[in-house]
Structure formats: structure tokens, C-alpha cells
Amino acid sequence: MTIEELKPIIEALVFVSEEPIPIKQITSLLEGENIDDIKTACDELTQEFNARNSGLEMRLLAGGYRISTRPELNEYVRRYLKAQPTARLSLAALETLAVIAYKQPITIPEILEIRGKSSTSAIKTLLDRRLIVPRGHKPVVGRPMLYGTSKEFLIQFGLNDVSELPSLEDFEDLVTN
């Protein structure tokens, strides 16, 4: 297939996918097609899609492609759905999530040391909402569980990977200014 023939197929796959669809999965669905052609088609499709200036955008999120509403239109979509923003996190859960995001993989005792407060209920909330996941055990006495952010975290915060998080220095600048 040509790149022009691949683009509508890829657009349809991205549209129906519940989660961001990775190039690897698209390639497996398009058996016999060249991965470089598929990547080129995805890149061109993303540029064309976003150049339309429509209410939707196509982005690379959490290692896969996704079509979603443009962030600047969220208020209108919220009004239409007559729903509150997604369930809010408590300050303790947000602080715990930030510590995990920046220091992952990390154990509960290490989170306690940084926050100075117990984080057990916040950890449970974050696990229930699938924003964090267990990442194995730390090879020390007692083998405490290690936690890290999940694919759902990347999706909810609009990130392709955790390297896109603002640097800690950016936050220090906000506090000092």
C-alpha cells in the first residue's frame, strides 16, 4: 500500500482504539506493510489532522497515537456532558503521586521520608485509579514493594513519557518568584 492508502486505515484504528495505539500494534494489524511506511503515514496523518484546526487533535501519548479533543475546548465538552471534571485527588494523593512520578521506582517508606506523612491511603487511591502500579520489590531486607507511574498516568496528564514532566528546577523558580 502507498502512504496515502495507509493513512485512512491508521486514522480509523486510532479512532476506535480505547487506548493510545502504538506503531508496533498498527504494524501487526497491517501485516506485510513496511514499518517505515507506517511511521511516515502516522507522522503525516498527525500533521494533517492537527493542521485542520478542528475540535480534535491526534497526538503521541504513552507511546501510542490517540485522537482526543483539544485541551482548550475541555470546558465546552464538560458543559455538554454536564459532568464534573474526573474525580479529584486529595492533596495527599497529589503529593504522593508527584513524589512517585519524580522518584520512581520508590517504596512507601521512601515516600514517607520525603513527605513526612503516611501515604498508605493515598497509595491505595492511586492504585484504585490505576495512576500507579507495582514495579517489583526492592532488593533489601524485607523486600518492600516498589511503585511507579502507569500508562494511565501518562494518558491522564497528556504525556508521552515521564521525561516530559516539568523539571524540579522549574518548580523551584515558581516558588522563589
Image (tube, rainbow, N blue to C red):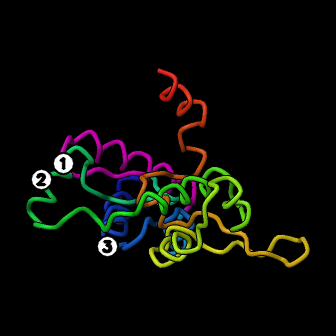
Q: Which residues are magenta?
A: 34-59
Mark 1 is on which residue type? Leu
Q: Is residue 74 left or right of residue 19?
A: left
The verdict on residue 44 being magenta is yes
First reached walking from the N terminus: tag 1 or tag 3: 3
Give the distance between the C-alpha atoms of the residues marked 3 and 2, in whole angstroms: 23 Å
Q: Horizontally, is 136 left or right of 20 in the view?
A: right
User: Are there few (<14), some (14-19), or many (20+) residues within 10 Å of tag 1?
Assistant: few
Q: Which mark is residue 76?
A: 2
As drawn, the residue found furthest toward the top would be 177
Label 1–label 2 contact, CB within 8 A = yes
Closer to the chain start, of discs 3 and 2, is: 3
Image location of residue 100, percent across then percent down: 62, 58
Tell me where residue 118 sits by quadrant: bottom right
In the rendered image, which quarter contains the N terminus?
bottom left
Q: Position of residue 140 (x, y in %)?
A: 90, 71
Between the residue at mark 1 and the residue at mark 3, the CA separation in whole angstroms equals 21 Å
Gap between marks 1 and 2 measured at Cα:
6 Å
Whether residue 55 is visible = yes
Q: Nearer the viewer, residue 75 or 13?
A: 75
Q: Residue at x 52, y 55 (%)?
A: 95
Would you name the residue on which mark 1 appears?
73
Mark whose residue sits in front, 3 or 2: 2
Q: Where 59 falls versus 126 (above or below)?
A: above
Numbered circle sitting on residue 16: 3
